[in-house]
Amino acid sequence: MHDIQVWLLVLTLFLPRIGLYIAWLNGTIPYNDIPFWGDFFMTLFIPRVLMLLYIGMNMGCGNIWFIVHLIMAIFAMGGVKVYSTNRK
């Protein structure tokens, strides 16, 4: 599968910061045009967006992994608020 390993794609669905950190330790960060400081700060603050950029650059935006990660990013960034509204 292209430049991105399957374990990275699956792990970053649920634990994006940890998955990107493990990929950095292994030296398996996918090819990208983002400078190192951009990779560093995006990993800290918006790792789901960084993963979307990695998938878009290496596999294309029409790939199923891109769509799944986009849906998870929307959910994670406030798309699902069922628990918090019912808790009141």
Image: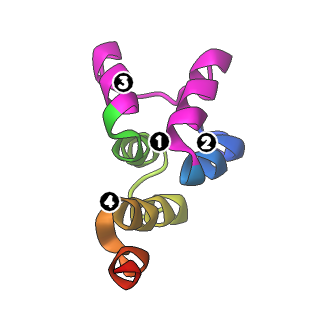
* Residue highlighted by disc 4: 77
- Residue 34: x and y, percent? 31, 25
Foreground mark, 1 or 4? 4
If you read the primary sequence from the N terminus, does the residue marked by circle 3 or circle 2 appear first?
2
Disc 3 target residue: 39
Task: From the viewer's perspective, tell me whether residue 15 is left or right of residue 75.
Answer: right
Per the rendered image, the range of residues in magenta is 15-44
- Which one is closest to the eye, mark 3 or mark 2? 3
- Residue closest to the eye, 58 or 38: 38
- Within 10 angstroms of label 2, few (less than 14), some, or many (20 or more) residues? few
Compare marks 3 and 4 and give the one earlier in the sequence: 3
Quadrant of the image occupied by residue 86: bottom left
Relative to 77, residue 54 above or below? above
Evaluate if marks 3 and 4 touch, with contact meaning CB atoms under 8 Å apart.
Answer: no
Element type where label 1 sits in the image: helix
Q: Quadrant of residue 75?
A: bottom left
